[in-house]
Each structure stands twice: as C-alpha cells, then as structure tokens.
Image (cartoon, grey):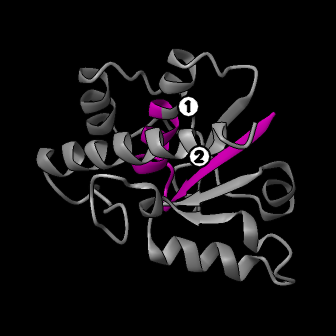
C-alpha cells in the first residue's frame, strides 16, 4: 500500500482538491487496495473546517466531492506514515524540507507541479484571494498532475 499526503498552506483549497481528484481517480482505476490519500496544511488556522466553499462548489461541478476536514501537517507522524509528501508550491516545499532536519525524508518530498504533463508551471497557485477563474485553473492543473502522478505510482507496483 502506497500512502500520499498532499500539502498546502491551510488545507482548504489546493490540497483537499488534489485529495478529492486523486480519490476519484483511484476509484476509477481500481486502485483502492493499493493507494491511500490524505491532505494537510502547514498552518493550523483552518483545522477542523471543510474545504473552502468556493473550492467545494467548483470541485462538485466537476464531479468531485470534497469531504475531508482540514488538519495541520504533523512532521513526527506524517514523515513516517506517508510514502509521498506532495507540496503545492515552492514555499510549502521549502517549509516541509526545513522540518526534515536530518534530511531523512527528502526523497519523499515532491512538488505537485513536477507531475503536470500538459502545463509548464513551477507551482500550483493559491486561489484563496482570487476569483472563480483561479479555482477553475487550480482544478485544471490538479486534474493533470494527479493523473500523471498516479501513473507514476502505479508503475511502482
């Protein structure tokens, strides 16, 4: 069983969307017994909350039901529990790497944008302070990246 953790800032926009998209793809590709997915945020401000209502709506319009409750990244637990720690932007990537003081988990930490196969981007932008088009753009990017990422994981089985 491979375990994936998507990480963004507050765990209410990008990472829960990636989690929901990946769960949908796992179901469609019959990988439920091979891959588990979760998401977390670097800050605890939104802990216990559902995804941002705007992301919930845009995701639902594409057929993704986001059901998670936000939680903060827990280095002591998450570094050990997950096989892949996938960050949404450069700052989150740097922050997660800084928490790995012994550099023991570096091979597990990835940038989500690395898995985009149709878009040449450096990070998944945070749509929080933007309008509807930003949420749609994030979903486009995540659909692309999550699909390619699952292909990569599947190749490991």
Q: Which residue is mark 2?
A: 152
Along the viewing direction, whichever of 123 and 134 lies nearer the viewer: 123
The picture places residue 58, in percent across and down from the top left corner, at 24, 32
- Asked if residue 13 is positioned above or below residue 66 in the image, the reply reads below
Along the viewing direction, whichever of 97 and 74 lies nearer the viewer: 97
Q: Secondary structure at mark 2?
A: helix
Q: Which residue is mark 1?
A: 68
Query: How many C-alpha atoms fall within 10 Å of the one at disc 2: few (<14), some, or many (≥20)?
Result: few
Q: Quadrant of the C terminus?
A: top right
Span colored in magenta = 1-21
The picture places residue 149, in percent across and down from the top left corner, at 53, 46
Q: Is-magenta flag for residue 3?
A: yes
CA distance for labels 1 and 2: 25 Å
**130 sits to left or right of 35:** left
Q: Quadrant of the N terminus?
A: top right
Q: Residue at x 46, y 63 (%)?
A: 114
């Amino acid at each position: 069983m491979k375990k994936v953790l998507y990480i963004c800032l507050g765990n209410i926009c990008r990472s829960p969307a990636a989690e929901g998209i990946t769960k949908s793809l796992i179901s469609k590709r019959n990988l439920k017994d091979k891959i588990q997915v979760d998401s977390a945020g670097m800050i605890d401000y939104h802990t216990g909350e559902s995804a941002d209502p705007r992301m919930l709506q845009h995701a639902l319009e594409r057929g993704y039901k986001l059901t998670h409750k936000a939680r903060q990244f827990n280095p002591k637990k998450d570094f050990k529990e997950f096989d892949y720690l996938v960050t949404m932007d450069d700052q989150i990537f740097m922050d997660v790497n800084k928490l790995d003081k012994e550099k023991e988990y570096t091979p597990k930490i990835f940038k989500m944008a690395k898995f985009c196969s149709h878009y040449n981007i450096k990070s998944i932008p945070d749509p929080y302070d933007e309008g509807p088009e930003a949420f749609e753009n994030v979903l486009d990017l995540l659909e692309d990246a999550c699909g390619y990422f699952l292909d990569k994981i599947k190749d490991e089985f």
